[in-house]
Image: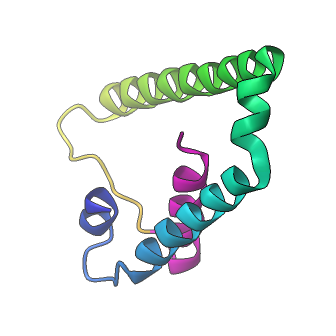
Amino acid sequence: MIGDSLANRGRSAWSTVAGVAAGDTTAMTVSLAGAGALLAASVTAFTALKLVGGSYLAYLGIKSIVSARRLRDDAPETAIPVQQQSARRRFLSAWTVTALNP
């Protein structure tokens, strides 16, 4: 929320707030539907979920390091540009992060 507000100065953060609320609702619905019980009962499903989640985090980390190095090499003395996002994009980003956060 704070990072989104700072990156999109002058724009309302309500789309991000709505995305977080929708993501929380999605996660609660999936949990109430029995996903937690399924993962607790199935060691294989839980292991697969951990491997997919860990792989995704490794991908994000590598992508972040490569991007930072590219920006550093391209323009060492300039500020890092911040790309403002539309309200729809901020909503979807907040929903995705919140719904998939364990």
* Residue 47 found in image quarter: top right
Up-down relation of residue 21 to residue 59 (above or below): below
Rendered location of residue 57, percent (x, y)? 55, 26
Q: Is residue 43 above or below residue 102?
A: above
Nearest the eye: 77 or 10:
10
Residue 93 belongs to the span the image colors magenta = yes
The residue closer to the viewer here, 50 or 97, is: 50
Q: Could you tell me how many numbered marks the image carries?
A: 0
- Image position, residue 27 (x, y; %): 62, 55
Q: In the rendered structure, which segment of residues is drawn in magenta?
A: 85-102
Q: Name the image quarter holding residue 12.
A: bottom left
Residue lying at 41% horizontally and 68% vertically, measured from the top left: 84
* Residue drawn at 74 percent across, 37 percent down: 37
In the rendered view, does 32 fall on the left or right side of 62? right
Tell me which secondary structure the magenta stretch mostly adopts: helix
Q: Is residue 39 left or right of residue 85?
A: right
Q: Residue at x 60, y 20 (%)?
A: 54
Of all residues, the one furthest to the left in this rendering is 77
Tell me if 53 is positioned left or right of 1 in this view: right
- The quarter of the image holding the C terminus is top right
Given residues 31 and 54, the one toward you in this image is 31
